[in-house]
Image (tube, coloured by chain):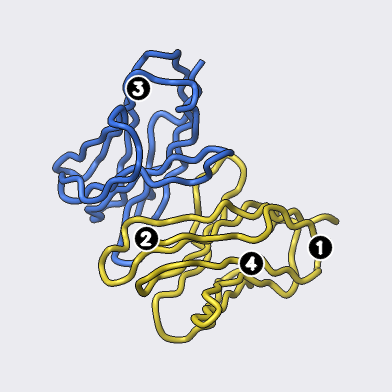
Amino acid sequence: AQSVTQLDSQVPVFEEAPVELRCNYSSSVSVYLFWYVQYPNQGLQLLLKYLSGSTLVESINGFEAEFNKSQTSFHLRKPSVHISDTAEYFCAVSAGGGSNYKLTFGKGTLLTVNP
Amino acid sequence: KAGVTQTPRYLIKTRGQQVTLSCSPISGHRSVSWYQQTPGQGLQFLFEYFSETQRNKGNFPGRFSGRQFSNSRSEMNVSTLELGDSALYLCASSAVYEQFFGPGTRLTVL
């Protein structure tokens, strides 16, 4: 079984400041890792994913995350945030190797970007 | 391609009633998963269907059930509703390595 811990439930930052949202996971098997974003009254949108290969993955809107196997972490970072990045962010894990239709989510981190 | 659609978007029911939610996956996707999202428990996996068969199941009581049709559309049913069933129910259809989520159905149980 897998579990995910998002260390911060809320992260307030000012516009144009850097941000890091922390995520740690636990699993006895190899995993796939995901970050999803949820805007108010909407479903989840995939932000980025790690399946294999390069441990640094990037999204089209400036976010990046680094898979660290030794620390079992997959922290999300952005060097300069915008007001429109205000949303809830969820880290998720699925077991690799074909059993990847069940996602285990963290509790979420509410990112609030203030002007 | 059209995204995942869920109907209805909002529902209000009373305790003891039953409810059916519908999900239409992205064309070509054969796997549909359901999740419950609440402020207290967060996002929890309910079940997953693939080619009309339930392939995975989460830790929910038998009041929660689902099915999938030959066109991959899926429904979930909750019988004997309880106040604690109030939640956002999300459906996701799967490509090989990622899940695409619908907007959800907001169920309120009074």
Q: Earlier in the sequence, mark 1 or mark 2?
A: 2
Q: Where B99 sits versus B42, above or below?
A: below
**x, y percentage for residue B91?**
38, 44
Q: Amino acid at mark 1?
A: Glu
For residue B10, side relative to residue B75 (left or right):
right
Q: Which residue in the protein does label 1 denote?
A: A15
Q: Amino acid at mark 2?
A: Ala
Circle 4 chain: A
Which mark is nearer the camera, 1 or 3?
A: 3
For residue A26, side relative to residue A58 (left or right):
left
Q: Where A65 sits versus B78, above or below?
A: below
Label 1 to label 3: alpha-carbon separation: 43 Å
Label 4 to label 3: alpha-carbon separation: 37 Å
Label 1 to label 2: alpha-carbon separation: 38 Å
On whether disc 1 and disc 2 are found on a single subunit, the reply is yes
Circle 2 chain: A
Chain A, chosen colour in render: yellow
Circle 3 chain: B
Q: Which residue in the protein does label 2 denote?
A: A1
Q: Which chain is blue?
A: B
For residue B35, side relative to residue B56 (left or right):
right
Label ID, residue B19: 3
| Residue located 31% across and 58% down the image | A101
Circle 1 chain: A
**x, y percentage for residue A40?**
62, 43
On whether disc 2 and disc 3 are found on a single subunit, the reply is no
> Do tag 2 and tag 3 residues touch (Cβ < 8 Å)?
no
